[in-house]
Image (spheres, rainbow, N blue to C red):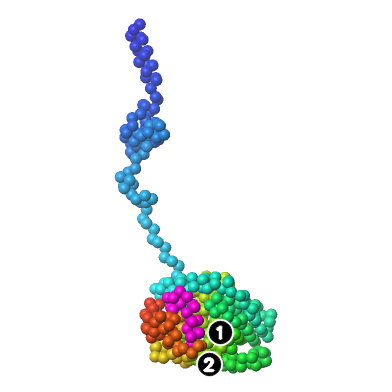
Amino acid sequence: MRKLSILTLFLFVLTALPATSNAAPKPNGACSKSGAITKISGASYKCQKTKGKLLWKKQATKSSSNAAPGSSNEAPKPTPMPVVKIRPNGPQTMAGQIELEKTYKILNVVSQELYARSLMVPKSKSEVLSDEPNNKLVASTKKVVDRTVEMMRAIKSDFPDNKVFLFREFPWLESNLKSICPNLYLNQIQYGWANAGCGYIWSGSLSKYESPGFQYDPNWSAEELLAFSGSHESVHLIQVLSDADGAFKIPAWYREGSANVGAGLVMASMPEYGNGDYGWADDVSRNSWAKPRCGAPFEQWKLKNDPVGHEAMKNCEYDLGRRLVEYIVAKEKTFDNVFKVNQEVRAGMGFDEAFLKHHGMARIDFLNEVERWLEKLEWDKAVTY
């Protein structure tokens, strides 16, 4: 009887033990001895207390435990290069364009800040008159002129409302413009396209910008070209052009270059055109700034403040001049100083003196400095028209 009782007690103890103590270990399954280590499917597991229970927990391998947080065994992915666009009249090498983008990044900020200031000035009440009043270019030009006037008014508070004459036929222009600004009328006949004068007036030939006379570039519209060109002419009016000989008081590269930069700043502020991208100017303004074409005019500008432009300077004053003024504006982070130089010249100061006063360096030192920048832009490889 006693032997039977002992056997019965032994069997009772066996059945009372947890069933898992003799079961094969499973990941996250129960275990009985804290700190015990076992292998499950070739991986190392350790018995450790989790939320009050002893469970088998997988252990990190040596290679993974030494790895930096968030790292993996995958090869690191290369940092994507910024998208750089080779533009029609920009640098034609990737290195040159990347260098120029540094300047354009600053000019975009200058444009944004100038536009923000323009929201605080009196609104433009400029007029656009035309012998084709229903031409869509009249309305688009009016919008550009208003934006330009207001942004220039942020610099020069009394910058006047513009009066614009867009014409198809010269007899109409003669009857409407000649009596109020004869010099501008003569310039329009001589030079075509668009011209500014008399302090608040500019004119533009529709036949130059629009079919059938429009033969400039098939990749963008007459509206885009006239927008940039019209803004350029409006910016001219912040210069010394209210004087009959005002254009001959400052060198051609500064006169035309600053008008192009001003237009670029305006276009960058308008969703219809640059839309935050000053570099849009390189899509539209198409006068060569390449060294093979413009190197000689550049050397001429070093020698003297030559006001002569157009054919005499191979039209290099427009976009090589733009490059020079872009460098100034980006360096100073403002377009205001360009206006200040013009005002000093208007008051009788020599250009070199005014340049030194407001740009902080002698003209020749500036030209030598900016030439080194042009080399970084690889201007020897730019487009030669």
Q: Which residue appears at 47% of the width and 73% of the height?
A: 107
- Say which label, 2 or 1, has the lower sequence index: 1
**Amino acid under disc 2:** Asp
159 to the left or right of 18: right
Q: Which residue appears at 54% of the width and 88% of the height?
A: 241
Name the residue tied to disc 1: 237
**Amino acid under disc 1:** Leu
SS class of the residue under badge 2? loop
Q: What is the quadrant of residue 77 in the picture?
A: bottom left
Most frequent secondary structure within the magenta stretch: helix
Name the residue tied to disc 2: 245
Residue 29 position, x and y percent, is 40, 33
Range shown magenta: 326-345
Q: Which residue appears at 54% of the width and 79% of the height?
A: 156
Instruction: Decide if residue 123 is in sight here.
Output: yes
Asked if marks 2 and 1 touch (Cβ < 8 Å), the reply is no
| Gap in angstroms between the C-alphas marked 2 and 1 | 13 Å
Residue 250 position, x and y percent, is 47, 88
Q: Does residue 171 show up magenta in the picture?
A: no
Mark 2 surroundings within 10 Å by alpha-carbon count, few (fewer than 14), some (14 through 19), many (20 or more): few
